[in-house]
Image (cartoon, helix red, strand yellow):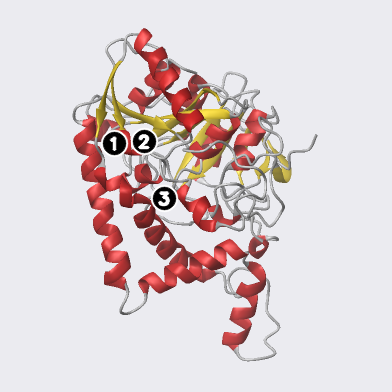
Amino acid sequence: MSYNVYITEATIDGAGDEDSPLAGRTVAVKDNISTEGVRTTAGSAMLDEYVPPYDATVVERLKDAGATIPGKTNMDEFGMGTTTETSAFGPTENPAAEGRVPGGSSGGSAAAVAAGEADLALGSDTGGSVRCPAAFTGTVGIKPTYGLVSRYGLIAYANSLEQIGPIAPTVAEAAELLEIIAAPDENDATTRAAHEEIGGPEPDDMREYAFADAADGDVDGLEIGIPTELLDGADADIVETFWDAIDDLESQGASYHEVDLPSVEHAVEAYYVIAMSEASSNLARFDGVRYGPTPDYEGNWNEEYAKVREEGFGEEVKRRILLGTYALSAGYHDKYYKKAQDARAWVKQDFDSALSEADVLASPTMPVPPMERGESLDDPLTMYLADANTTPVNLANLPAISVPAGETSDGLPVGLQFIGSAFGERKIIRAGSALA
């Protein structure tokens, strides 16, 4: 059956030879990552005919590694959603749970891997948009440390939160893909060299961080912190499956203790204020002059500008622009945006404290199983609250991985999330590889 995985199918061949790391493998690319000469829509009617004149840095690195890109994957419009149902090109079906959503906003990328329509895929994660679809489709997704992977060529939603990350069938394959795309980039001043952050010699080859080497499944002596706040309110089946996975890790030599993260109670609110505020600023460029459909200019410019945005943006994008503009407006900036930034600092402080006494933190990736198609579209608040376990990681700019942990009693996929210290990708990859 068709899962509506791709917005645009177009074969982009890599430049490597048969010995290149990704030779003979296909890597699907989320449609908010620029591809030279191939339509890139960000899931929006606003960019229906946009064809970038350049490749994103991650795309250049895929091509240099010999990968073949089979197409641009479906996504929630401008990355705004948890279900891949806000796309202007229709919803994506979940190959692992038909009739259910594949998660979002990188649902097309995860569905491509789950359905075998691509070997690997790239998504982007602003508040869980790689980890959520990985959890919902039974695949592996990594949200890297902020600054590990270049964002050059990524159509921005919320600059201070988002990172491009890999989705794959196994932890080892996800780690291998992360090796290819990680590294500083002169076109992105936010990128940093991991060896400078965590110590160690400067790498001298393409396998810059040797992430795949860490996928050895050896968790003997691993200390896991479990934030009780990220279990509270989760679906009972999810919690039971989570603890079964922790028991499995214990049998392999890991140990765990519970930790408190009181700040995460306010993380969802802080995340959405910050993300919507940044989106309000970023999406101002879509005005019918630089991007978007060309207006007729029959009335005054303000009217035509409003008409272009009314027609080009979907309901969820317009909702977030309005809320973000309100949060940044005179008289409300200190009341909302500044408080959200204060909460963000508190979240980071809590994570740093918890990780000072643990190698990794663990939680269910999503507090609910995959929702039925259409279930959350009429209730945006429910959709926002589903991000409770993933958004704190983006606020703290930390790495996290979602790995399959089992299934609910109804046979629906459940993901387990490991969170690490900044540039601690090797630890979360090692922990995840013991399960997948």
Above/below status of 319 relative to 253 = below
Report, in whole angstroms, how far the alpha carbon at label 2 lies from the one at label 3: 22 Å
User: Looking at the image, is mark 3 or mark 1 nearer the viewer?
Assistant: 1
Q: Residue at 60% x, 32% y: name it.
A: 137
Mark 3 and mark 2 in contact (Cβ < 8 Å)?
no
Mark 2 and mark 1 in contact (Cβ < 8 Å)?
yes
Residue lying farthest bottom? 299
Badge 3 marks a residue whose secondary structure is loop
**Three-letter amino acid code at disc 1?**
Ala
**Three-letter amino acid code at disc 3?**
Asn
Q: Earlier in the sequence, mark 1 or mark 2?
A: 2
Q: Name the residue under label 1.
A: 422
Above/below status of 407 relative to 312 = above
Q: Name the residue under label 2.
A: 399
Of 201 and 10, nearer the camera is 10
Mark 1 and mark 3 in contact (Cβ < 8 Å)?
no
Give x and y (percent) for residue 249: 38, 14
Q: Residue at 51% x, 29% y: name it.
A: 237
Q: Name the residue under label 3.
A: 187
